[in-house]
Amino acid sequence: MTYAMGNTDTYGVQFRAASAFTGCEVYVSAVPAEGGSLTLSLYAWAGNYAKSIAEKPCAGATVTGIRRGSWVTLPGDFKAGEYLLVLSGGSDSLAVEMREARTDRSVTYLHTSASGLSLVSRLTGTDIFHGKAIHAQCAGFCQLRCMGGNRWAGAHTAGQQDCRRHP
């Protein structure tokens, strides 16, 4: 389901990463004709939403020139831990995707309230044998590591697809 964002809307997802990762991505399904912009901020989880966003973010970026049907990335080198990814400042007519399925490893927030939805988003990591970036092919957060060949170690959390395969 599509959720429109305006300048004052904030959506977030609280998650636990079992291993280090190199970025967070959010799927944007619609943008204004001239392209969209969106601010992504990553906070250390401080026990609840309000306490988390009261602290300085670990990383943040405003991404411009977003195209319809694209993944918007907040890159970085992040350690394993518990985080809150917040989306804000979206262009009018920009929309993200939600699923009517709550995962057991993440909580999606609409404004500052927990919801029963899942934001279509993912973590990116590094293939530990080949040094290449990997992308989990799923609707939700996954933590994956390539163990060589087609063997993966990780946790699939969204229940949408089998993401334990080599891209």
Image (cartoon, rainbow, N blue to C red):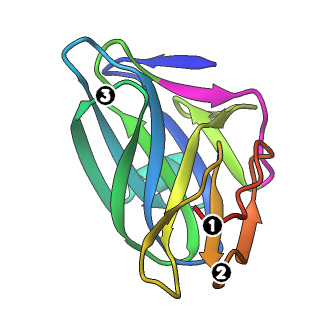
| Front disc: 3 or 2 | 2
Taking the spot 52% from the left edge, 88% from the top edge, the residue there is 129
**Which residue was labeled with disc 1?**
166
Residue 112 is covered by the magenta coloring: no
Hey, which residue is sitting farthest bottom in the picture?
Answer: 129
User: In this view of the protein, can residue 56 be seen by the observer?
Assistant: no
Asked whether disc 1 touches disc 2, contact meaning CB atoms under 8 Å apart, the reply is yes
- Asked whether 104 or 147 is in front, the reply is 147
Q: Secondary structure at mark 3?
A: loop
Name the quarter where the N terminus is drawn. Answer: top right
How far apart marks 3 and 2 lie (CA) works out to: 33 Å
Secondary structure category for the residue under label 2: loop
**Start-end of magenta stretch:** 96-104
User: Residue 71 in the image: x percent, y percent?
Assistant: 42, 41
Q: Which residue corresponds to mark 3?
A: 67
Residue 167, x across and y down, in percent: 57, 61
Q: Is residue 142 left or right of residue 10?
A: right
| Front disc: 1 or 3 | 1
Residue 151: % across, % down: 72, 78
- Per the image, the residue denoted by label 2 is 149
Identify the image quadrant of residue 88. Answer: top left
Q: CA distance from mark 1 to mark 2?
A: 8 Å
Kind of residue at badge 1: His
